Image (tube, rainbow, N blue to C red):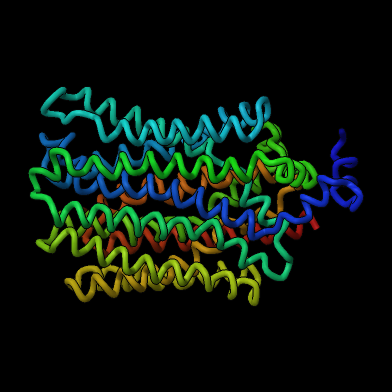
Amino acid sequence: MSNASMSESAHDPSDGASESQHAVSPSDIAVGVIIGRTSEFFDFFVFAIASVIVFPLRYFPFEEPLRATLWSFAIFALAFLARPLGTAIFTVIDRAYGKGVKLTIALLLLGTSTVAMGLVPSYESIGAAAIVILCILRIGQGVALGGAWDGLPALLAVTAPKARRGFYAMVPQLGAPLGLIVASLLFAYLVAQLSQEDFIDWGWRYPFFVAFAINVVALFARLRIVVTPEYEQMFHARELEPSTLREAIANDGMTILVGAFVPLATFALFHMVTVFPLSWVFLYTDESLAGFLLIESVAAVFGLVAIYFSGVLADRMGHRKYLFQGAIYIAGFSVAAPLLLSGQELGEAIYMILGFVILGLNFGQSSGAVASLFERRRRYTGSAIVSDLAWLFGAGFAPLAALALSAWGGLAASGLYLLSGAVCTFLALWLARKLEFGKS
């Protein structure tokens, strides 16, 4: 059946499938999106937190603390390098066998890689092989995350009411603070209840095992939505089918490149208020680790609320104008951030809450700034590539770069890193506007 005939049947009220399809609302899609993103971000933050408080001690005991943490952050970046490879591999699987098979394989790979990390012996037990195994598993996570793209955000974007597109654009982003809150509270509980020896020996493993269980639940929740005839019909009718990567890059290469840099400031800030401050506090202060994890959880609640309001504000202001103003706020925060983070516990709390509010307001709208520039039949794959590259350029090396710069030039240097991200976002939004005028 052609796409045209599918579109016609989608609007034929006499068709039984169409009636089922008509009953499917953006709210139904939103539920699947939130569940899926929460599980992915929980895995993400479990590894991120362990990269600061566990892996340097277990896998780099031969290095002094700063260098050990930098090596740990280098492994952290491997998943972001592997995500585009995962998208390439699983796009082929998607085209050949469908979204259900693709999602099942991707999420099982994600869960298996994550739970296996909790079983890796220490460097003292098997030497450098422990580091190699951890690197392989981290790459496995990245490949799986590339394959976990289910197209639901793109479907949500084209099914949402035009006047509320900003509101529905923020829905997928809610998974980030939800995943962080659960991961931070779980680690905080283990750190508070166990001795340091027991935590480093075996206690740190439990969050990785919990991640596997959450992935299984998320898999069934997403399959329940994605593989139903109603949703398959919605994907077909709106031409949201996977094109080849070659076709997407050949036709939309500039759009993909611009889209990857639009959220650069937001994704840089993402790690500047999650992973980086945890590493700074852990390395350079004597503060309670459990206490700071609790502060991070509370700040993430503020971020959750800010993401919600981003949808309301973006619908009033317009998407790109909103992101431009958000980049201005990030630039301002980059100047104040070093002063706040060096202000002991009160300054750190203000840094975290203010940072999460600014992050939430920007992150809530970071995913859809250039989606409208793709033709519908290339939006599915184009959006997946943009997501991979945006996370790679904006977030993949952010903890490593920020910590290295702060160690070299003080906290002010990390602020300059964040400021450079804001400048890149300004330029990318300007280019996105030029592209829009060129296609109109």
Q: Is residue 377 visible?
A: no
The foreground one among 85 and 67 is: 85
Q: How many marks?
A: 0
Say whether residue 192 is left or right of residue 102: left
Instruction: Give 394 or 2, whichever is nearer the viewer.
Output: 2
Residue sitting nearer the eye, 31 or 386: 31
What is the quadrant of the N terminus in the image? Answer: top right
Q: In which quadrant of the rendered image does the C terminus lie?
A: bottom right
Picture coordinates of residue 60, whole percent (x, y): 16, 35
Task: Write the residue at 9% across / 61% down.
Answer: 286
Q: Is residue 107 above or below residue 279?
A: above
Q: Position of residue 55 (x, y in %)?
A: 21, 40
Q: Is residue 222 left or right of residue 140?
A: right
Residue 416 picture location, percent across and down: 35, 62
Residue 47 seen: yes
The image quadrant that residue 9 belongs to is top right
Q: Closest to the observer: 37 or 78?
A: 37
Determine whether, in the image, residue 100 is placed left or right of residue 14: left
Please give the name of the residue rendered at 65% of the width and 43% of the height, measured from the top-left corner. 382
Which residue is drawn at the image coordinates 22% and 58% (left, top)?
Answer: 409
Q: Is residue 254 above or below residue 31?
A: above
Extreme residue toward the front, this view: 16
Relative image position of residue 70 (x, y in whole percent): 24, 43
At 73% across and 40% down in the image, what residue appears?
Answer: 229
